Image: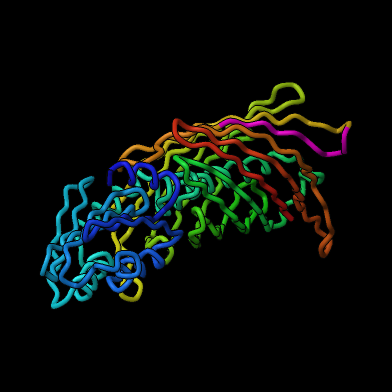
């Protein structure tokens, strides 16, 4: 019965409990970790099972973001045994009272669990669709992979915008503001992302090379639980020839959520190739990225977590730019497809595809500064993208403005 409950609730709720004592049972579901921990207070049990006392035998089956955890205390004992079958872990907490034993269990999750805690964090990324660190489309690792590829492809495409004064030596720098809303579902869990990636691109004079500094910011909700993300990245776009550019990049990101009990840092490095092939008035661009993404031990206050998740990522894609001057001058439609694959640590989703399109305008603006002409690129685009995999699907709406 307990196993059936876990299977069902894992698909609908991030957290739930089933408590059995004195021949009675009750069940509750929660949107966040804090509310569930409050419900595990033994004083709460008597509200649902009046016959319960501190000497009663009690078993609690916890759905912890999709991973079953069993807490049990025998009759006339203050000891609590925690069993996590998915990772073959059994821990005994011996306090002077059951409340003290629960405090020891909390300390275990905040960092004292060491290797066993690391295995639990890895299991959450490997078997559940709601881990903020890795394994699903709105996780920190997945979004970092997408940003690395998109920035390299976006600035590579802009390097090919025809300049009105190509003979002049001064290129203006660019500020890019992007806004994205994403909605994905996997195994009954819905995730929504609101992100605002920001970027500043330094365009070098007498060159099409560029330095890209980016600050991705995101707010994610997993069925009501809030997750916050912040990052910093730097890339250098090297124009190898008029059609081909290479962009190596480094990145650092941080994710934290009290609601789901997650805290992690991520470092990354990637190399992206962008190759443009003219096809009459159209342009086909082939993108290929190889990246490495790894978590770091993270401490904040009393919490210390180290999931030790590392993955090599291949992301390949193609886009076709179709000019639409008959609609509006300097506009185009772009259709694209990508394939992303993860190798290394086990993830809930290790391969997914995306298809989509965007419509926008690219234009060069030339201004005069102390007798010299400065070339600025102005770009505005809006689009939609559909993501699908064996066990997840969803969409994102995107808007970007570069000036």
Left of 214 or right of it: where is 399? right
- Give the quarter of the figure containing the N terminus: top left
> Relative to 9, does residue 351 appear above or below in the rendering?
above
Q: Residue at x 43, y 62 (%)?
A: 32
> Relative to 270, does residue 389 appear above or below in the rendering?
above
Q: Residue at x 28, y 59 (%)?
A: 306
Residue 329 is covered by the magenta coloring: yes
Q: Residue at x 59, y 56 (%)?
A: 195
Residue 152: x, y in percent? 56, 44
- Quarter assignment of residue 5: top left
Residue 344: x, y in percent? 31, 40
Residue 214: x, y in percent? 56, 57
Answer yes or no: is residue 75 visible: yes
Answer yes or no: is residue 170 visible: no
Relative to the observer, which residue lies in front, 181 or 337?
Answer: 181
Relative to the observer, which residue lies in front, 190 or 306?
Answer: 190
Q: Residue at x 50, y 57 (%)?
A: 233
Relative to the observer, which residue lies in front, 378 or 43?
Answer: 43
The magenta-colored residue range is 327-337
Left of 252 or right of it: where is 22? left
- Determine the main secondary structure of the stretch shown in magenta: strand
**Residue that extends furthest to the top in the rendered view of this protein:** 280
Residue 60: x, y in percent? 26, 58
- Give the quarter of the figure containing the C terminus: bottom right
């Amino acid at each position: 019965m307990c196993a059936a409950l876990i299977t069902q609730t894992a698909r609908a709720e991030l957290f739930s409990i089933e408590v059995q004592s004195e021949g009675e049972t009750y069940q509750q579901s929660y949107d966040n970790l804090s509310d569930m921990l409050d419900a595990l207070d033994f004083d709460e049990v008597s509200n649902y099972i009046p016959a319960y006392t501190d000497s009663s035998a009690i078993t609690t089956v916890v759905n912890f973001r999709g991973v079953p955890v069993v807490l049990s205390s025998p009759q006339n004992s203050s000891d609590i045994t925690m069993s996590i079958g998915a990772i073959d872990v059994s821990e005994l907490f011996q306090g002077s009272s059951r409340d003290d034993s629960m405090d020891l269990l909390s300390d275990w999750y905040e960092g004292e669990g060491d290797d066993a805690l690391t295995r639990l964090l890895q299991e959450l990324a490997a078997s559940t669709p709601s881990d903020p660190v890795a394994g699903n489309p709105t996780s920190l690792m997945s979004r970092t992979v997408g940003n690395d590829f998109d920035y390299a492809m976006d600035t590579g495409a802009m390097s090919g915008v025809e300049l009105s004064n190509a003979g002049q030596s001064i290129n203006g720098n660019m500020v890019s503001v992007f806004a994205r809303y994403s909605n994905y579902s996997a195994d009954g869990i819905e995730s929504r992302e609101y992100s605002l990636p920001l970027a500043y691109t330094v365009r070098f004079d007498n060159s099409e090379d560029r330095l890209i500094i980016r600050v991705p910011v995101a707010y994610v909700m997993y069925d009501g639980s809030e997750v916050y993300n912040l990052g910093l990245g730097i890339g250098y776009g090297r124009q190898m020839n008029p059609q081909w550019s290479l962009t190596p990049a480094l990145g650092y990101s941080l994710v934290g959520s009290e609601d789901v009990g997650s805290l992690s840092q991520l470092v990354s490095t990637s190399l992206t190739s962008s190759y443009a092939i003219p096809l009459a008035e159209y342009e086909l661009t082939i993108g290929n990225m190889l990246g490495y993404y790894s978590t770091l031990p993270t401490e904040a206050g009393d919490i210390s977590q180290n999931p030790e998740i590392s993955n090599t990522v291949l992301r390949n894609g193609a886009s076709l730019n179709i000019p639409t001057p008959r609609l509006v001058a300097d506009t185009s439609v772009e259709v694209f497809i990508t394939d992303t694959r993860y190798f290394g640590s086990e993830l809930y989703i290790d391969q997914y595809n995306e298809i989509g399109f965007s419509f926008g305008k690219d234009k060069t603006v030339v201004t005069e500064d102390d007798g010299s002409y400065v070339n600025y690129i102005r770009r505005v685009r809006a689009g939609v993208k559909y993501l699908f995999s064996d066990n997840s699907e969803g969409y994102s709406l995107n808007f970007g403005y570069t000036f």
